[in-house]
Amino acid sequence: MQTNPHSRTQAKPRGWLRVIGLGPGDPALLAPAARAALSEAEEIIGYRTYLQLAGPFRDDQRVHDSDNRVELERARQAFQLAAAGRRVVVVSSGDPGVFAMATAVMEALEQAEDPAWRQVDLDIIPGISAAHAAAARVGAPLGHDFCTLSLSDNLKPWSVITRRLQLAAEADLVIALYNPRSRARAHQFSEALALLREQRAPETAVILGRSIGRADEQVIVTTLAEIDPAQVDMRTVVIIGSSQTRVIDATEGRRWVYTPRWYPEER
């Protein structure tokens, strides 16, 4: 008995969702898995500045750009499209799991009322974080124990930030500061520096890495005493060395920075 192929129910194509990290912005540092996801995607979602770094895109790809402050809305849109059978990429800068879109995607998934969202083929594709990209430019300042902190108080109280910064400083960890200074809260970075100066020596090495991997990249090696807050903005990652972090003067004025793998015994 023959069946009429036209009578069969057409299976809905299975969509997928990939959350990718662009790394610092240099195409040479984009992970091959992230590049493949971008090539295969039908729908590409992200903050417009990051989408410019991820492009160009083909005419058959739909690009959904938005402001940087609507992460959860982007995540929900991505699940809606993927659950409908579309191949979707959400774009982050750096690593998507470090103060970026992977967390928003997980939050949207946890809050989802549509059970189809939990059936979406989801994958998080890592990228090079801003802290690691900046560190690589000067050597190995993250060569021993370190932590990362965001100075943005949009989603957590400033009192929590200062408490964590105080504890990290007391623990003598190398500290990578994200979102250090915006126009609306320029004073907070100065407060953070004052707190650090209570715990760290004036000659403590500091690295300012701005727009690493992009055309306007700037890397400055300075000290805790000499750092100029005016050189720091939201596109800068600030790495504060520990008591063991070293600076090596090299040829043509270049300075290397590293934190030894060992740590002296307490006496």
Image: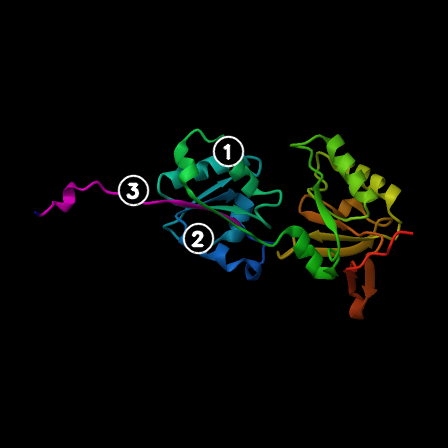
Between label 2 and label 3, give the one nearer the viewer: 3
Separation (CA) of disc 3 from disc 1? 24 Å
Say which label, 3 or 1, has the lower sequence index. Answer: 3
Residue 193 location, x and y as percent? 82, 42
| Circle 2 residue | 57
Q: Nearer the viewer, residue 142 or 207?
A: 142
| Circle 1 residue | 110
Residue type at mark 3? Lys
Identify the residue at horizontal 84%, vertical 56% (top origin).
244
- Mark drawn on residue 69: none
Identify the residue at horizontal 51%, vertical 52% (top origin).
54
Q: Nearer the viewer, residue 191 or 107?
A: 107
Between label 2 and label 1, give the one nearer the viewer: 1
Residue 203 location, x and y as percent? 88, 53
- Eyeballing the image, is 187 above or below 254? above
- Eyeballing the image, is 244 above or below 91? below
